Image (cartoon, helix red, strand yellow):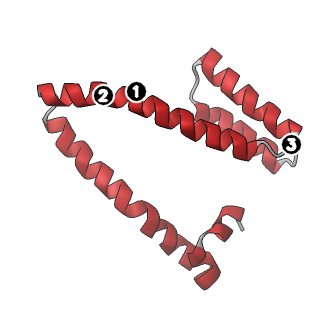
Amino acid sequence: MLSWWGDVIGYHVAGFVGGLVATVAMCGPTCLFALLIGRIWNRFKDAPWRVAIQAALVPLSIGLIGASAAVIATAAAQSAVAVAVTVATAVLTYAMRINPLWIFAGAALLGLAGLI
């Protein structure tokens, strides 16, 4: 069983199905809201207020992504190998301009292999 299911209260209460229901309940409304807002947002692609809002959201997004990265990096610093993987991920993502999900997938494989 995947270890992250253990963090979901639904799994503790009703097993796999309870974990699945709890996950859908946590993620579903946000995904639906994003889908609806995205459709409405595209209708106003030439509106001046949309351009202004998007320009204002860029620095905010960069700050939130940086804060999230700091939280994840701090939580990941459990061993010297984990710190090395975190630093390598940051350097590779910045230097090579590849999608970080590929690097996270590689790190996940290292974890599954027991190297981290």
Residue placed under numbered mark 2 in the picture: 56
Residue placed under numbered mark 1 in the picture: 59
Q: In screen coordinates, is 28 left or right of 39?
A: right
Residue 16 visible in the current orientation: no
The quarter of the picture where the N terminus appears is bottom right
Q: Where is residue 42 in the image (x, y as percent from the top left)?
A: 19, 36
Residue placed under numbered mark 3 in the picture: 79
Label 3: which secondary element: loop
Contact check, label 1 and label 2, Cβ < 8 Å: yes
Residue sitting at x 74%, y 39%: 107
Instruction: Using a 10 Å C-alpha cutoff, classify the residue at mark 3 as few (fewer than 14 neighbours), some (14 to 19) or many (20 or more).
Output: few
Q: In this view, does 28 lie above or below 52?
A: below
Quarter-of-image position of residue 100: top right
Residue sitting at x 48%, y 37%: 64
Residue sitting at x 63%, y 37%: 70
Q: Which amino acid does label 3 sit on?
A: Ser
